[in-house]
Image: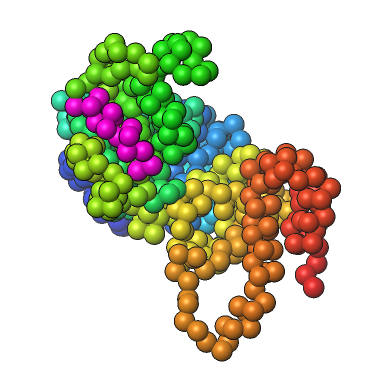
Amino acid sequence: MTSVNRTQHQQLLRQLTPLLTDLSREMPLRTRYQRLLDVLKQVIPCEAAALLKLDGETLQPIAIDGLGKDTLGRRFEIAHHPRLARIIRAEGAYLFPPDCPLPDPYDGLIDMQQGLVHDCMGCAIYIDDTLWGALTMDSLEVGSFSASDLPVLEAFASLAAASISTALHFDAIRHRANDQQRRAEAYRLQAHDAAGPVLDGQSNAFRTLQKNIDLVASSDMPVLITGESGVGKELVARALHERSLRADQPLVSLNCAALSENLIESELFGHVRGAFSGATQDRPGKFQMANNGTLLLDEIGELPLSAQAKLLRVLQEGELQRVGSDRDHRVDVRILAATNRSLDDEVKAGRFRMDLYHRLSVFPLHVPSLRERCDDILPLAGTFAEENRTRMALRALRFSPAAQQALIDYPWPGNVRELEHSIARAALMARSHADNSGVVTITERDLGLLTSPATPDTSPSPQSEPQQTRGLRDAVDDFQRHQISLAIAHANGNISAAARALAVDRANLVRLAGRLGIALPGKKRAPDK
């Protein structure tokens, strides 16, 4: 062995030593994965590297280096990404030729770069002969990788498999006492696509929320879920139910604000035939429907006082009577309540019973606003961008640097729900003026985020007075522009469906959109005047 080769091997050994030492240590999974990518980029220089985990028919980035933070929120469907499909089906590491025509999933996602990926290679990761995920490496410079890099990448894939297997072993030991609960959680993750949106985040505030959910989920304690509109209180309730011992029983939800006072008792407790006009047959209420399961009382602060007293009796005694009946029915229900109001203030104002408040808030759980979890904004934006990319059949949907900064700076008074709708609307706007490459960039203008209405500047100044005197027309136009864009986004670009949702004639909607400067799908944006 020459002195040059000996030096290279010694350097490689020094680089790998920390990873080998990690195999005997217990550490957070995120830290373990990130250390793996750090060393990989030292050994094989590149612009971007990613560790992806297989989840059904998708690959989910769980650690990245050199890619935009929103990448962590994306899910790459294997059927729509032929490069990823080839990597996980190849025997060993695979290097794509620079002129490969297959689209790269990371085009436009590499930090601070606008170019498309030129060099790409990857390797599947197997644990116990089962496909677990993949390692990918990308460069913007042709010729960055060579065939000599493939054995090194394969070695890293084996090291990654060992590291992941070790982490799973530690995890199994730590959670063995709660094996049944972990199986329920695994079922929840497998049902992700069918069940709809799930809680997702990496910020400290969100991790604290997740710890509290795990802490109280397995008990039968009533939980009072508080937080602003749009933060995901219903998702928290679903997580509490699915991680509980009642996960195989129904989760029933009732929006207390959506019913009139004379119907709320029937909805809660049921009624018998003839109890009131229109009661043509016996009907069980939400309590009996949720028997042995969980009942979510959403917007509990809207519940009338008359119904609060009867609800309290059921919570105390576990018995109810249907409207029009004197027969008692026993129920075993875990209660979750959600509200965006301060029930403490409602009690002081005499609008909510103190005894009911204390009965419901045995374990209060506050869901932080998006302003309190800024680190989650870009990953969530990436999640919603990927959903819209798939829906619109785009090659790539990315954010410009200015758009990313605008997402971070905006205070999000509507929280996660507003973020989701804003990304859908911006994706539609961006597609309307994009070229035919299939790579669409959402700009700050497409987002159209204005200063938060929650923190207006009310200080008088001479400069602001002219805007205040001529602002009514502009405000009406902005409102119409927002509603039309939102309706079109929700209708996936179908103008007729959007017109129906807005209760206007289609032709009138097209004319109004033209006046407001809204680019409709299939039509070019009118030039700015």
Is residue 500 found left or right of 415 in the rendered image? right
Is residue 10 found left or right of 116 in the rendered image? left
Picture residue at 56% right of the left edge, 63% below the top: 449
Range of the magenta residues? 301-316
| Residue 465 coordinates in the image, percent (x, y) | 59, 83
Is residue 226 found left or right of 220 in the rendered image? right
Is residue 446 found left or right of 386 in the rendered image? right
Is residue 309 in the magenta section? yes
Q: Is residue 117 visible?
A: no
Picture residue at 55% right of the left edge, 35% below the top: 77
Picture residue at 78% right of the left edge, 56% below the top: 512
Where, by quadrant of the figure, is residue 173 drawn?
Answer: top left
**Residue 331 vertical placement versus 192 (above, below):** above
Is residue 32 in the magenta section? no
Picture residue at 64% right of the left edge, 79% below the top: 469
| Residue 223 coordinates in the image, percent (x, y) | 25, 37
Along the line of sight, the residue nearer the viewer: 345 or 105: 345
| Residue 286 coordinates in the image, percent (x, y) | 38, 22
* Colour setting: rainbow
Count of picture labels: 0
Along the line of sight, the residue nearer the viewer: 107 or 175: 175
Where, by quadrant of the figure, is residue 377 drawn?
Answer: bottom left
| Residue 88 coordinates in the image, percent (x, y) | 50, 32
Specify the quadrant that holds the C terminus: bottom right
Along the line of sight, the residue nearer the viewer: 428 or 307: 307
Q: Is residue 469 visible?
A: yes
- SS majority, magenta: helix
Along the line of sight, the residue nearer the viewer: 86 or 359: 359
